[in-house]
Amino acid sequence: AILEPSNAPTPTPRPFETTKPVVLHIGTAPHKNLRRVWKACAQLDCHLAIVGQETDEICELQRAQALSHSMHSSVSDEVLEQLYRHCDAVVFVSTHEGFGMPLIEAQVFGKPCVTSSIEPMKSNAGGGAFLVDPIDTQEIREALHRALTDAEAVANVVKKGRENAKRFSGVEVARQHARVYAEEIRTI
C-alpha cells in the first residue's frame, strides 16, 4: 500500500541533523542507482538521506567521495512518513522498477521528485516529477538542483504530482478493481 500522511496533530522534530537541504533516497539495491545519486549529490550542497541497509557499496562511496548523508534502516511507516515530511526533495532514479512506489509517495507528501524517464516511472509520474535519464549523473544533478532551488518549477511539479497521486489512492484502486471484476462477471 502507498504510504499516506497520517492526521497526527503533533509535529515531530526534524529527523535530520543538518541545516542543508535534504534529498531523500529510497533503497540500496544495485538497481536503485545510489552510486550515480551519490555522485550527483556530492556536486550539490545537500544532505542525502538514504533509506535502506548499509552496503559495501555505501562504504566504498564514503571512502571515495565525501558527502553529508544519513542512513535510515528498518524504518517503520511512521518514521518513513517523517522522513518524507521533512525532506526537501525525493530522488528515485532506478534503472529498472516494477512500479515505483516512492515516486507516488513523494507526490502524496507534496515533495518534488526526480525520477527515471523510463517505464513505469515515466507513466506513473503523470507529469508530476522531474524526469531524467537514470544513467546520466549530470542530468540527475541538474534536476536535483532544480528541485532544490527553482520554486516555480517545484510548485508546478508538486501541484501536478498531488493530482496524479489521486489515481493511486486506495479508493481509486478499489474502484478500478471493481470495474475489472464487474466486466469479468459480465463475460461469464
Image (cartoon, grey):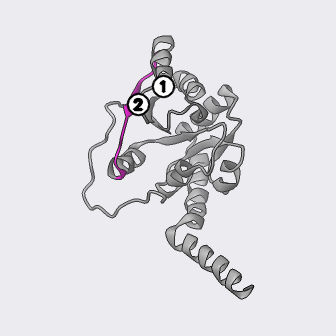
Q: Could you say whether the residue bearing mark 2 is in a helix, strand or loop?
A: loop
Residue 170 against residue 157 in the figure, above or below: below
The kind of residue tagged 1 is Asp
Q: Residue at x 65, y 26 (%)?
A: 137
**Camera-side residue of 180 and 9:** 180
Residue 72: x and y in percent read 37, 36
Q: What separation in Å lies between label 1 and label 2 (alpha carbons)?
A: 7 Å
Specify whether residue 72 is painted magenta: yes
* Quadrant housing residue 130: top right
Residue 35 against residue 128 in the figure, above or below: above
Verify CB contact (< 8 Å) between mark 1 and mark 2.
yes
Report the residue that reaches farthest toward the left. 10
- Label 2 neighbourhood size at 10 Å, few (<14), some (14-19), many (20+)? few
Residue 172: x and y in percent read 56, 72
- Label 1 neighbourhood size at 10 Å, few (<14), some (14-19), many (20+)? few
In the image, which disc is placed on residue 55?
none
In this rendering, position of residue 184 left or right of residue 108: right
In this rendering, position of residue 63 left or right of residue 183: left
The kind of residue tagged 2 is Lys
Specify whether residue 182 is painted magenta: no
Q: Which residues are magenta?
A: 66-77
1 or 2: tag closer to the N-terminus:
2
Residue 102: x and y in percent read 52, 48
Count of all numbered marks drawn on residues in the image:
2
Q: Residue at x 70, y 80 (%)?
A: 184
Q: Residue at x 50, y 37 (%)?
A: 27
**Camera-side residue of 1 and 62:** 1
Residue 155 against residue 116 in the figure, above or below: below
Q: Quadrant of the C terminus?
A: bottom right
In the image, which disc is placed on residue 20?
2
Q: Residue at x 42, y 47 (%)?
A: 84
In the image, which disc is placed on residue 45?
1
